[in-house]
Amino acid sequence: MARRVGSDGARTEAAIREAALRLIARHGYEALSMRRLGEEIGLGAAALYRYFPNKQSILFGLLSQHMQDLLAAWADARLSPTRSALDRLEAFTLFHIRHHLPRADGVFLSYMELRSLTPENFAVIETMRRRYERDLIAVLSAGLAEGSLACDDPKVTARAIIAMLTGITTWFRNTGPLSPDEIEEIYWQMVARLAGASLKEIA
Amino acid sequence: MARRVGSDGARTEAAIREAALRLIARHGYEALSMRRLGEEIGLGAAALYRYFPNKQSILFGLLSQHMQDLLAAWADARLSPTRSALDRLEAFTLFHIRHHLPRADGVFLSYMELRSLTPENFAVIETMRRRYERDLIAVLSAGLAEGSLACDDPKVTARAIIAMLTGITTWFRNTGPLSPDEIEEIYWQMVARLAGASLKEIA
Amino acid sequence: MARRVGSDGARTEAAIREAALRLIARHGYEALSMRRLGEEIGLGAAALYRYFPNKQSILFGLLSQHMQDLLAAWADARLSPTRSALDRLEAFTLFHIRHHLPRADGVFLSYMELRSLTPENFAVIETMRRRYERDLIAVLSAGLAEGSLACDDPKVTARAIIAMLTGITTWFRNTGPLSPDEIEEIYWQMVARLAGASLKEIA
Amino acid sequence: MARRVGSDGARTEAAIREAALRLIARHGYEALSMRRLGEEIGLGAAALYRYFPNKQSILFGLLSQHMQDLLAAWADARLSPTRSALDRLEAFTLFHIRHHLPRADGVFLSYMELRSLTPENFAVIETMRRRYERDLIAVLSAGLAEGSLACDDPKVTARAIIAMLTGITTWFRNTGPLSPDEIEEIYWQMVARLAGASLKEIA
DNA sequence: GATGAATGAGACTTCATTCAT
DNA sequence: TATGAATGAAGTCTCATTCAT
């Protein structure tokens, strides 16, 4: 009926987030009940409301965290615009795979549960997603200008690349036949060709 | 109370399917209530049970129909194995785009609502999906054998291509700047390069 | 799980209203649960929602019904403005008592549960209540003009009279020592004196 | 975590009472949550339990305090039974108005929230209320015996007077057109007439 | 003296589904 | 063929209350 010995707010909140991410990825936002979520971490459903004002805010918290992490990590990893477009495209490709592979649940949420957001929350997340996409478009445009890439429409190409790379998380398993390194290599080759990189330059 | 003049079972069932496809694509399977679905076509919720034994069967009906249509259309459109791998890859690419573009709702369901299926129903749909994928893998393998294509792993490449092509439906709008024909052209170029088609051959 | 033999919507709705009136009068709106209300008439709580979209609408339905009945009955019972103010005051007094005595629960709700209404619903009911009060004020004013009454402020006097008369329902019991007729007689004497009716005229 | 400098038990308890009186009058006992009450005075809900064992006891404390204040003040204000009934009736009337006008919230609670009391607590309050009423009945009876008053049934008349006087608090506002003094004057005239005071005697 | 964490009960409400009509 | 009445389970969320700190 009251606080349990040794219980701690910060730890509990982290546990909620972690369990919610896992369960929503597995069964979907609508299919997740607060009761079930509480159970998962040994709590009554009511206790969740000390940490999140409602169910929607859990989802939004997860998605906005995911996008913030992505943007922050990418800000660290991206190459300076003074570098060649090909190098920058490679950096993007490898970063995207490496960042997303261990975050399959978050990626899944980011694609599948956008529609479960309220319109306001959706707008916030969508803006973040666009910012990331814009960076890739810029790289492709630079490559076209330089003549080092030969693709058609940078916007369309960017979407094709992101769809292709993000799709990896739907089938990748740590126990599968391909290691992350191998996947990075294979996909970088595909991206490079797809974007029309001059063959000699890649080698 | 009684049958309304001119009401017709087959037409009603089609109306249910059509409304369900639209509503589930918009709001998700869990978020769709039978009451709402009935309303949409001017029926009480109870009437739906004349056509489908339960809600799950509506979803399964939609998804299995979608896959059957896909497989049947592809059976018609695919080229004989005696044709060149490049021709067959082009046929696949153009077919995939042309078939999916006007079926955005169905595509969406096929990706988003798999998890809402019961395990048995899921297995059925998954098998169909695999069959389609296998055909693309075969084409890529043939191209490698012929030497007309130069990609790494046909299985991985096939998934990358399908993810890339299917992603189109998430942003394509009839009112957008690109026509279906232009999209087909752009994507075929990308697929060809990605799969390592010898450049002179494409032209 | 489904309709019971011989069940009937109109009868059920009436039963809900009647039970709600009784229970809210007894225990208050907030203290009444939908489960309890359903139980009272042998229904699950969910069934109530076929008849009322939510709990608030039950209360509002009760209160607005009560006021409508009051206004309609009073429209029937009031005397023409051509009659003497004293006669009209007597008519009001007797009407008010006679109308309210068998409606103790409704009267109680009308006073106690106004605050449980949403602001919009409150405004609707308040307007009705004012209309009724205005009629009494008009009678008192006419009496002052005629010289047949001698009270101070018609508005204040009207409120005093209504408070006094309405208070009857808080203690009146059918099994008590006073009959409705006796109560009417006693209160009419008090009202007449309070309003300063010339003594000879009452006799 | 620890006592804040200058916090003081007695002052805190008074603050709780004061806030509870205001909030319950505004929104009702059932609608008041302990969390909200704590917030109102800058305390966590749990802290309230240092001062009151439970929510019911807060309400009971308020109501019994209200009645005790009333009875004590009336004991001070009432005239000796040796004085004339008319004087004593006037004293009661003026006292009742003067005492209740600045205590609108308490009056409101006393009428509206009786039903929120447990049966035992209700009995306690009801007894106090009766004691007060009995005094007025005695005055009216004395007036009848003296011949200075001419009303019918002292018990009924007493209730009518109390209902009428108490009703003032439902509409009185300090900012309204009538001052407390004017209200006392108007109501005393009405009470005197209602009770059948010989006209020359009032003047 | 007061808080922060948690609970269990129970609130309103919606849902898929059933069955008499 | 379809509806209208009803159900039981479950959903999100709030509440008074408790107890370690």
Image: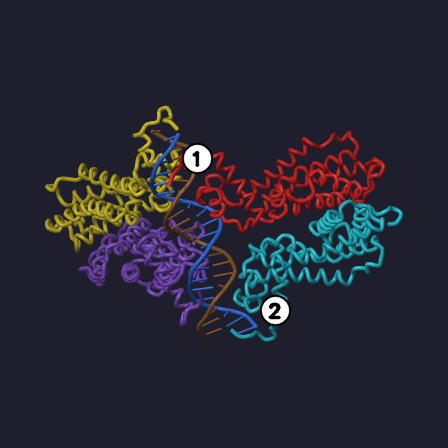
Chain colours: A red, B cyan, C purple, D yellow, E brown, F blue
**In this view, E14 is above or below B194:** below
Query: Which residue is disc 2 drawn over?
Result: B12
Give the SS element for disc 2: helix
**Dot 2, how many residues are within 10 Å of its Cα: few (below 14), some (14-19), or many (20+)?**
some
Residue C145 appears in view? no
Q: Quadrant of the N terminus of chain D?
A: top left
Relative placement, left or right, of D3 versus D191 is right
| Amino acid beneath label 2 | Thr
> How many numbered discs sit on the rendered protein?
2
**In this view, F13 is above or below D77:** below
Relative placement, left or right, of A203 versus B30 is right
Relative placement, left or right, of A140 versus D64 is right
The answer to which image quadrant residue D179 occupies is top left
Residue A80 screen position, x and y as percent: 74, 30
Residue A182 screen position, x and y as percent: 72, 40
Residue C101 screen position, x and y as percent: 27, 60
Query: Which chain does tag 1 point to?
Result: A
Query: Which residue is disc 1 drawn over?
Result: A7
Q: Please name whichever residue, C33 or B156, is drawn nearer the observer in this view of the structure.
A: B156
Mark 1 or 2, which is nearer the eye? 1
Give the SS element for disc 1: loop
| Amino acid beneath label 1 | Ser
Query: Which chain does tag 2 point to?
Result: B
